[in-house]
Amino acid sequence: METEKTRYTDEELEEFKALILEKLERARNEYDHYRAALMNQEGNDTADTSPTFKVLEEGASTLSKEEAGRLAMRQAQFIQHLQNALIRIENKTYGIDRITGKLIPKERLRAVPHATLGVDSKK
């Protein structure tokens, strides 16, 4: 009789760690991009254009700054979730549903590597 696995093997955890580190790097790059847009380091200067166009341009840049701020906050939260997942890997508790204590399916973890709930628990 086969007993149910209670945790992922060290090899499996290493596989997830590589996936998370890759996503973390991408997320940090995106975060930096949003921060740069927020700080307006792109250098969109409208000093030499007509006043009407400048007003329209400033309105558009305000909207994009708000959007950049929102996206930067979401990205920072995503980065934190990924970092927490790395801690769970180190603690060998990664991939364990925090409600049922059962393993979260690999397919779900590959899609959402920072998940702490299986699909059934999430419902």
Image: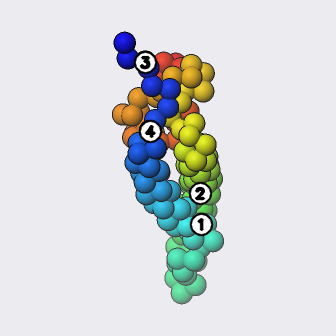
- Residue under numbered circle 2: 72
In three-dimensional space, the C-alpha distance between marks 1 and 4, rounded to whole angstroms, equals 38 Å
The secondary structure type at the circle numbered 1 is helix
In three-dimensional space, the C-alpha distance between marks 2 and 1, rounded to whole angstroms, equals 6 Å
Nearer the camera: disc 1 or disc 4: 4
In three-dimensional space, the C-alpha distance between marks 1 and 3, rounded to whole angstroms, equals 49 Å
Tell me where residue 71 appears, x and y as whole percent: 56, 53
Looking at the rendered image, the quarter that the N terminus falls into is top left
Q: Amino acid at mark 1?
A: Arg
Other-residue count near label 1 (Cα within 10 Å), few / some / many at <14 / 14–19 / ≥20: some
**Residue under the point 56% across and 33% down:** 116
Tell me where residue 91 appears, x and y as whole percent: 61, 43
Which numbered circle lies on residue 5? none
Q: Does 23 sit left or right of 80 as displayed?
A: left
Q: Residue furthest top?
A: 1
Q: Amino acid at mark 2?
A: Ala
Q: Are marks 1 and 3 in contact (CB under 8 Å)?
A: no
Tell me where residue 20 appears, x and y as whole percent: 47, 51
The first of marks 2 and 3 along the sequence is 3
- Residue under numbered circle 1: 35
The secondary structure type at the circle numbered 3 is loop
Q: How many numbered circles are shown?
A: 4
Which numbered circle lies on residue 9? 4
- Residue under numbered circle 3: 3
Q: Are marks 2 and 1 in contact (CB under 8 Å)?
A: yes
